[in-house]
Image (spheres, rainbow, N blue to C red):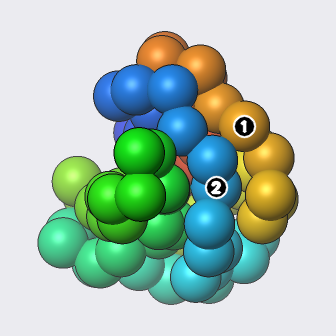
């Protein structure tokens, strides 16, 4: 089953550091969000492969929005 990574707050996607098919490890930064001039890293919580990257730079995400799935 895929591990879903979701946004914890309303923010802008400032930087995307991974792509579909990339191998990631627990603790790797997937994307960096920006909210109120603060940079918030979104961290992988499992080892695996990015099966679905659902955001792109400049996009606004809402709390609970899917950022990525790690298979």
On the image, the x and y values in percent for residue 19 come to: 72, 76
On the image, the x and y values in percent for residue 17 come to: 58, 82
> Helix, strand or loop at disc 2?
strand
Q: Residues within 10 Å of mark 1 (few under 14, many from 20)?
A: some
Q: Is residue 53 above or below residue 59?
A: below
Name the residue rendered at 80%, 47% in the picture: 59
Q: Earlier in the sequence, mark 1 or mark 2?
A: 2
> Are the two marked residues, 1 and 2, in contact with CB atoms closer than 8 angstroms?
yes
Name the residue rendered at 29%, 78% in the picture: 28
On the image, the x and y values in percent for residue 31 come to: 51, 66
Q: Is residue 57 left or right of residue 32?
A: right
Would residue 25 be seen by someone viewing this image from the given angle? Answer: yes
Front-lying residue, 29 or 49? 29
Q: Is residue 22 left or right of residue 45?
A: right
Would residue 1 be seen by someone viewing this image from the given angle? Answer: no
Q: Is residue 31 above or below residue 29?
A: above
Name the residue rendered at 59%, 20% in the picture: 62
Q: CA distance from mark 1 to mark 2?
A: 6 Å
Mark 2 sits on what residue? 13
- Residue 71, disc: none
> Helix, strand or loop at disc 1?
strand
- Quarter assignment of residue 61: top right
Mark 1 sits on what residue? 60
Q: Is residue 49 above or below residue 55?
A: below
- Quarter assignment of residue 48: bottom left
Front-lying residue, 68 or 57? 57
């Amino acid at each position: 089953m895929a591990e879903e990574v979701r946004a914890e707050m309303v923010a802008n996607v400032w930087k995307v550091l991974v792509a579909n098919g990339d191998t990631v490890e627990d603790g790797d930064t997937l994307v960096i969000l920006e909210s109120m001039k603060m940079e918030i890293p979104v961290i992988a919580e499992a080892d695996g492969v990015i099966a679905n990257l659902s955001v792109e730079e400049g996009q606004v995400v809402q709390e609970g929005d899917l950022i990525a799935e790690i298979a």
